[in-house]
């Protein structure tokens, strides 16, 4: 354990300063002086305050530290969420409990019909896992959309899902997969379904002193479909909006689903075309020459051709 001191640097950013003023940490709180210590008038410190560093080697030791240190301690995994907040003094823990030395929190394994992933398994390890590529490929594809390789080498799955940040990528995927989170605390272990874990932005079902130890995911049926897409400001950025889907079709419904999805129109690309009905089905509405205009000549339907180098011509069913 050691204490690390840092000299402050100043960032003139009135918007960020205003955010700090309206943050949950009130100016008259006991730690407010640590947040603004060394800042020049109108400026903002962007280096974390002093803290004591702890590196346990077991889950038991980590839980003991968190219980003994109380609210002044924060657990840290990859640190990509907590450290930026500490730099802006939005978080000012007196103690950091680094979980990177706990070997039991790492690894990917099969348990029955589930895959269990240790909370400290990095996104780089998710990308390189042949087991996940075979059983749950959406995890690999989502991991490739997170930031850049330098971040994925350190960022962990547990840190991504446990923080409750709505901009993170993995929570939506966990909800879609029906994942269950393994949580450990001084009062024992418990399991929380992902759909019950998130209670709001940055609010989760984790109790003080608890840590996420593993993620259990039921293996989807063979031949399932999947997709994850996110709207972002730039490549590798946090998601402004995101959606995940895992689709499994039963054999009796497969042919019907394929038929209904095949006839599409450029104006309505996500639904079946409304079938034409005969006049008898519409009723005996009288028709006159003045009631309807002459039918227009329809142009032939285009098809993608080899002349279209990007193959983006509208697609039609014959």
Image (cartoon, grey):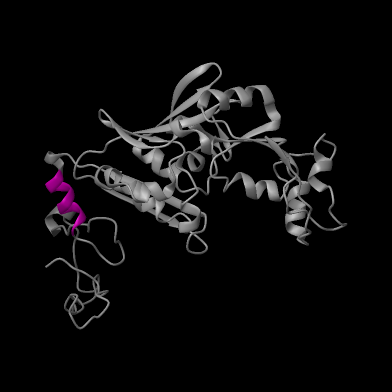
Q: Position of residue 102 (x, y in %)?
A: 50, 33
Q: Is residue 197 above or below residue 317?
A: above
Q: Position of residue 310 (x, y in %)?
A: 27, 77
Residue at image coords 81%, 40%: 32
Q: Is residue 261 magenta?
A: yes
Q: Position of residue 233 (x, y in %)?
A: 52, 63
Looking at the rendered image, the quarter that the C terminus falls into is bottom left
Read off the magenta span. Answer: 254-262
Looking at the rendered image, the quarter that the N terminus falls into is top right
Res 283 visible: no
Q: Position of residue 209 (x, y in %)?
A: 60, 25
Residue at the extreme bottom: 307
116 left or right, relative to 65: left
Number of numbered callouts drawn: 0
Residue at image coords 20%, 83%: 307
259 left or right, relative to 161: left
Res 18 visible: yes
Q: Magenta region's main secondary structure?
A: helix
Residue at image coords 25%, 28%: 112
Q: Is residue 23 magenta?
A: no
Residue at image coords 45%, 58%: 149
Q: Is residue 106 above or below residue 8?
A: above
Residue at the extreme right: 41
Q: Nearer the viewer, residue 143 or 14?
A: 143
């Amino acid at each position: 354990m050691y204490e690390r001191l840092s000299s402050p640097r100043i960032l003139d950013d009135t918007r960020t300063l205003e955010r700090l003023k309206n943050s949950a940490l009130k100016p008259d709180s006991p730690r407010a002086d640590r947040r603004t210590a060394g800042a020049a008038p109108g400026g903002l410190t962007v280096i974390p305050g002093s803290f004591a560093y702890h590196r346990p080697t077991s889950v038991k030791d980590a839980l003991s530290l968190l219980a003994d240190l109380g609210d002044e301690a924060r657990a840290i995994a990859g640190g990509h969420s907590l450290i930026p907040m500490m730099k802006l003094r939005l978080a000012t823990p007196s103690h950091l409990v680094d979980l990177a030395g706990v070997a039991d929190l790492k690894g990917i394994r099969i348990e029955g019909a589930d895959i269990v992933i240790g909370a400290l398994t990095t996104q780089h390890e998710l990308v390189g896992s042949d087991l996940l590529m075979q059983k749950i490929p959406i995890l690999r594809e989502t991991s490739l959309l997170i930031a850049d390789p330098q971040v994925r080498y350190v960022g962990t799955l547990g840190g991504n899902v446990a923080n409750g940040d709505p901009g993170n990528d993995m929570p939506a995927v966990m909800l879609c997969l029906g994942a269950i989170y393994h949580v450990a605390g001084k009062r024992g272990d418990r399991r929380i379904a992902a759909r019950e874990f998130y209670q709001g932005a940055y609010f989760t079902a984790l109790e003080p002193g608890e840590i996420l130890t593993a993620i259990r995911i039921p293996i989807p049926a063979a031949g399932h479909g999947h997709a994850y897409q996110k709207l972002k400001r730039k490549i590798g950025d946090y998601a402004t909006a995101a959606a995940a889907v895992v689709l499994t079709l039963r054999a009796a419904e497969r042919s019907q689903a394929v038929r209904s999805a095949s006839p599409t129109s450029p104006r309505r690309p996500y639904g079946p075309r409304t079938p034409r009905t005969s006049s008898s089905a519409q009723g005996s509405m009288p028709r006159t020459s003045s009631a309807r205009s002459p039918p227009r000549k329809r142009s032939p339907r285009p098809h993608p051709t080899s002349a279209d180098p990007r193959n983006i011509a509208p697609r039609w069913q014959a």
